[in-house]
Image (cartoon, helix red, strand yellow):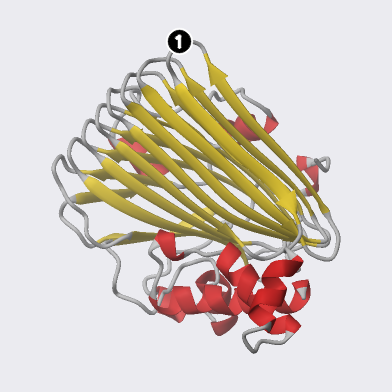
Amino acid sequence: MKDVNLADYSFTGLERGQIADLRSLDASDKERILHAGVDVESDAASAVFMHMDQSTVHCESRDPGLELLDIKAAMKKYDGLPEYAWKLVPRDKDEFTRNVAENVHGGYFIRTKPGAKIERPVQSCLFLKADGAGQNVHNIVIVEEDSELHILTGCSTAHSATSAAHLGITEYYVKRGGKLTFTMIHNWGVNATVRPRSVGVVEENGVFQSNYVLLNPVGTLQMYPAIHLNGRGAVARFNSVIVAPEGSHVDTGNRVIMNAPETRAEIISRTITTGGTIIARGHIAGHAVPCRGHLECKGLILGGGRMLAIPELDATVEGVDLSHEAAVGKIAQREIEYLMARGMDEAEATSTIVRGFLNVDIMGLDGPLAKAIQEQMEQIDAHGS
């Protein structure tokens, strides 16, 4: 992993004012964050949050079953959130967590009411506009008992050349019978340094599902979110689609720790390098029975680059059921020939296979966002073929 010197970035003096209507953003910024999953022209969100550089600039809840606050406001309102803040991610885990703990710029606090089914997603955007900006964000998500929530978070720089550092802490709490779907789409740039640190706990019969998409260049990204299944019948699922062009260094993966019986875990990742480096990690631990976990990591190398797959299974009691499948390679010639025999040329056949490999349909994305992702995939196809 590339060395990071936080002294290269400014973590003070880049505050922003409130933005009452995000549709007033300039066209280029709107396009960048659309490719990160945030459609400011849409009203189809239960809540909208935006953090720009070192300030929360928009925070609006539209659903009575949902509380949305800037993290600083929440800490003040709830006397420091002693039950939740920094309980899952240690302040001193590394230099990045320490930097956030010492100087939090903002972030979101999201909490559902017990039993609330929030049908429309929460739309949040973490945006870096100023060149050389350092951004420290702390997010806390609480899904109360028997409630359901989908958060769609887009992270982006203002343009692909922006030099910036994003340090993000996120702590998830899924209570008994709750369900959280967390979709995160990154649209950084060749000079972006990204260091998220995320941990969650899921109680009895709770469900945590994560969808992650990275289709564009990033300078250096390192993250390894972990979910602890602490209640009987709890479930965690991770789906990731990652592309690393030349110059990108991506070290990412997911961990699930099953601490209770009848828990289930699934980690599925699809990665492509078109010249960059990808380290794809996965870790499933079974500490109670019965429990079942499966890890699947598949990667393609198109036109160079490096890919390292590191699957880990950790069983500490007799009777756990853990499995993994890891494969790194190239597109099989027989697949190309099969499609060419049905009328495609080689480039079309290759593009079709890549799109199928990077299928994000399971994530349930639609509208302008789905179109934007499709456009990005077509650019990847052209590069890869």
Quarter containing the N terminus: top right
Q: Say left or right for 17 vs 117.
A: right
Query: Residue 34 at x, y = what percent?
Result: 51, 73
Residue 262 appears in which quarter of the rendering?
Answer: top left
Q: Is residue 15 above or below residue 176?
A: below
Residue at horizontal 15 percent and vertical 55 percent from the top? 64
Query: Identity of the amino acid at label 1?
Result: Glu
Q: From this viewpoint, is residue 165 visible?
A: no
Residue at horizontal 82 percent and vertical 62 percent from the top? 246
Quarter containing the C terminus: bottom right
Mark 1: few, some, or many residues within 10 Å (few <14, many ≥20)?
A: few
Q: Residue furthest right?
A: 304
Q: Which residue is mark 1?
A: 318
Instruction: Please state which of residues 194 and 55 is positioned toward the viewer in this rendering.
Output: 194
- Helix, strand or loop at label 1? It is loop
Q: From this viewpoint, is residue 14 visible?
A: yes
Instruction: Please state which of residues 86 and 274 is positioned toward the viewer in this rendering.
Output: 274
Query: Residue 358 at x, y = what percent?
Result: 58, 63
Query: Residue 350 at x, y = what percent?
Result: 70, 75
Instruction: Please state which of residues 180 and 306 is positioned toward the viewer in this rendering.
Output: 306
Residue at horizontal 66 percent and vertical 75 percent from the top? 338
Q: Is residue 54 above or below residue 309?
A: below
Query: Residue 121 at x, y = what percent?
Result: 31, 60
Residue at horizontal 42 percent and vertical 60 percent from the top? 362
Residue 321 appears in which quarter of the rendering?
Answer: top left
Instruction: Please state which of residues 301 and 118 is positioned toward the viewer in this rendering.
Output: 301
